[in-house]
C-alpha cells in the first residue's frame, strides 16, 4: 500500500511542475506580445509628432512667404495636436525655423534652415533640444 501512495505523490508533483512550466511559457509569450504592441504604439506616436512638427514648419514657411518679417513665437493647432514655432532667427543670408511637437509622450524638435530670399531648404534636422 505504501508503493501506491508514492506513485500518487509523484503523479501530483509532476502535474504541478508541468502546469507551472506551461504557465511560465504562456506568460512569457503573452508579455512579449504586449511589449510588441507597446513598441508599435510608441512608433506611431513618434511618427505623428514628427508629422505635426513638419506641418508646423510648413505653416511657418507659408507665413514667411506672405510676410518676410514673420517672427514665429506661436502655437499652432494641427488637427487634434499642437505644435510650437520658436522664434525665427537670421543667420547670415539664412533663416532658422524651429518647431516642437509632442504627442502622447513622443517629442519631436525640428530645425529647418532656409535661404531667406527664396525660402529654399538648406537643411532639415531633428535635434534633441533647442
Image: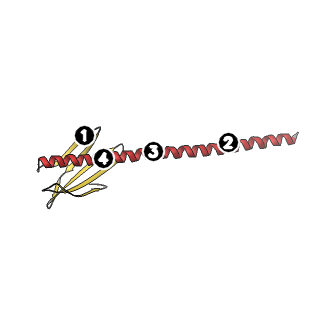
Q: CA distance from mark 2 to mark 3?
A: 28 Å
Q: Earlier in the sequence, mark 3 or mark 4?
A: 3
| Above/below status of 97 relative to 45 | below
The answer to whether marks 1 and 4 mark residues whose Cβ atoms lie closer than 8 Å is no
- Label 4: which residue? 51
Confirm whether residue 70 shows in the render: no
Q: Crowding at label 2, few (<14), some or many (≥20) Cα neighbours within 10 Å?
A: few
Q: Earlier in the sequence, mark 1 or mark 4?
A: 4
Q: CA distance from mark 2 to mark 1?
A: 54 Å
Asked whether 86 or 32 is in front, the reply is 32
- Residue 95 position, x and y percent, is 17, 56
Q: Earlier in the sequence, mark 3 or mark 1?
A: 3
Residue drawn 14% across the image and 60% down it: 93
- Residue 84 position, x and y percent, is 24, 46
For the C terminus, the quadrant is bottom left
- Label 3: which residue? 38
Q: CA distance from mark 1 to mark 4?
A: 13 Å
Q: CA distance from mark 3 to mark 4?
A: 20 Å
Q: CA distance from mark 4 to mark 2?
A: 48 Å
Please tell me whether mark 1 or mark 4 is closer to you in this view. Answer: 4
Q: Earlier in the sequence, mark 2 or mark 3?
A: 2
Residue drawn 24% across the image and 40% down it: 77
- Residue 90 position, x and y percent, is 15, 57
Secondary structure category for the residue under label 1:
strand
For the N terminus, the quadrant is top right
Please tell me whether mark 3 or mark 4 is closer to you in this view. Answer: 4
On screen, residue 11 versus residue 94, left or right, reads right
> What color scheme is it?
secondary structure
- Label 2: which residue? 19
Asked whether 104 or 62 is in front, the reply is 62
- Residue 5 position, x and y percent, is 83, 40
Amino acid at each position: 500500500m505504501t508503493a501506491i501512495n508514492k506513485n500518487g505523490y509523484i503523479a501530483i508533483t509532476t502535474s504541478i511542475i508541468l502546469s507551472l512550466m506551461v504557465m511560465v511559457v504562456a506568460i512569457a509569450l503573452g508579455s512579449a506580445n504586449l511589449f510588441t504592441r507597446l513598441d508599435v504604439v510608441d512608433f506611431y506616436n513618434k511618427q505623428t509628432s514628427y508629422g505635426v512638427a513638419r506641418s508646423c514648419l510648413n505653416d511657418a514657411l507659408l507665413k514667411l512667404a506672405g510676410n518676410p518679417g514673420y517672427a514665429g513665437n506661436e502655437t499652432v493647432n494641427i488637427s487634434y495636436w499642437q505644435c510650437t514655432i520658436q522664434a525665427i532667427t537670421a543667420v547670415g543670408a539664412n533663416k532658422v525655423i524651429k518647431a516642437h511637437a509632442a504627442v502622447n509622450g513622443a517629442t519631436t524638435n525640428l530645425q529647418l534652415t532656409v535661404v531667406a530670399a527664396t525660402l529654399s531648404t538648406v537643411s532639415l534636422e531633428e535635434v534633441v533640444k533647442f
